[in-house]
Amino acid sequence: MIDDVNFAGLPAGKARTRGPFAIHEILSGGSPARRFARRGIGLSVATAAGQLSYILVLPILSRMFPPSDFGDFIIYLSIVNISAPLAGLRFESALYSAPDKARARTIFRLSLSTIAFMSAMAGGIIFLTADFLPSDASHALRPLRLLLPLGIFMAGLWDLASAWAIRRDAMRTLAIARFAQPFVLALLQIAFGLLALPAASLVVAHIGSYAAYALIIFLRTMTREDVAGIAATTLRQIAGAARQEIKFLFYTTPAFIITLLISNLPPLFMGSLFGAEIAGNYGIAYRVIYGPLTVISYPLSNIFTAEASASHDPAAVQTAARFMFAVSLVLVAAPAAVFGLAAPQLAPIALGARW
């Protein structure tokens, strides 16, 4: 397991003397800064490698499944992605600053119970309202009524597993899981495509990949004492933790919801107005162009959140933030913009004529 980082050990004055982004300080300065860079880069590389494995098989999948099947899958993903921040009411964020193991176990039980309840409630709403949606959206959701609540639950569990791994300083395990999830998704979808299974199999593969992600993290980081402590948590303790940690719902959820609405509402509108095939085309373009923007920046932000919560040195936190910004700009945003310009010429060659 990679060593923990304590920003308090980084001299405050030194962080302010290395240019606008203090990259030299991060990469070659004090030991805490170097460890932060190793943790962030290692996790980002593993995440990017996993996402790349899925992007590389898209030309295969696009020839196995028509755009309409991908459209149904994208509509499912949009609903799940929008619901994910609400599934656990952001209680898992409290794991980052939990003062001890007992408190962390109580927060874990609170988050898991909330995810289960919210997923069941979402399933009931979907079941009752699917027939009243526009025809194309209703056609896509009708066979997924049972899978959607499970997908929402697994999305919430994904967030909880990530927070638990960061809380346990299990960055190596988190990197393995971040690589495995899209890799398992690609393998399952290819297998289902070879079997000529319907569009719902794309959703089953997604749920299976999230299950693999959570399983890897929990098997490698959760002890018997953790399981016993989580199981022994009382309703009084859960209610008390909910009252104390409700601030995470109000302070962090709006930003998550707005971000997710921007990227996930378009396929829902496209699917309802123009059919699943258009939504499928949008989903593939989004995966190829926008997806890489998050595979490096998002893991870095997870580590930064944990470290900023525990740090007592504002200068060191500022230095880490500048490092994150520079890496995201140079290694993620700029290449994605360049590749996006060439997409109209590359898409028919890579994905097939019907795309």
Image: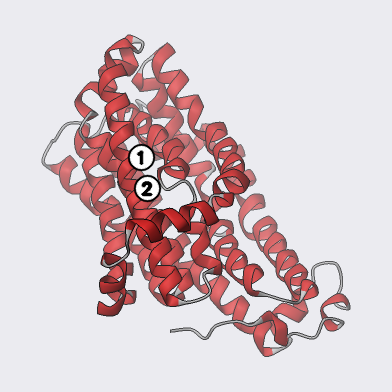
From the viewer's perspective, is residue 332 above or below residue 339? below
- What percent of the width, then of the height, locates residue 324? 67, 64
Which disc is residue 134 wearing? Answer: none
Secondary structure under the numbered disc 1 in the rendered image: helix
Q: Amino acid under label 1?
A: Met
- The colour scheme applied to this rendered structure is secondary structure
Left or right position of 85 against 211: right
Secondary structure under the numbered disc 2 in the rendered image: helix
Name which residue lies at 14% across and 35% down: 197
Q: Is residue 53 visible?
A: no
Q: Amino acid under label 2?
A: Thr
**Among all residues in the image, which is located at the extreme left?**
195
**As rendered, which of 266 and 343 lies closer to the eye?**
266
Q: Are marks 2 and 1 in contact (CB under 8 Å)?
A: yes
**Among all residues in the image, which is located at the extreme front?**
236
**As rendered, which of 194 and 145 lies closer to the eye?**
145
Q: Quadrant of the C terminus?
A: top left
Left or right position of 317 against 206: right
Left or right position of 321 against 270: right
From the viewer's perspective, is residue 113 above or below residue 325? above
Corner quadrant of residue 320:
bottom right
Left or right position of 53 against 208: right
Q: Quadrant of the N terminus?
A: bottom left
Which disc is residue 114 wearing? Answer: 2
From the viewer's perspective, is residue 93 above or below residue 166? above
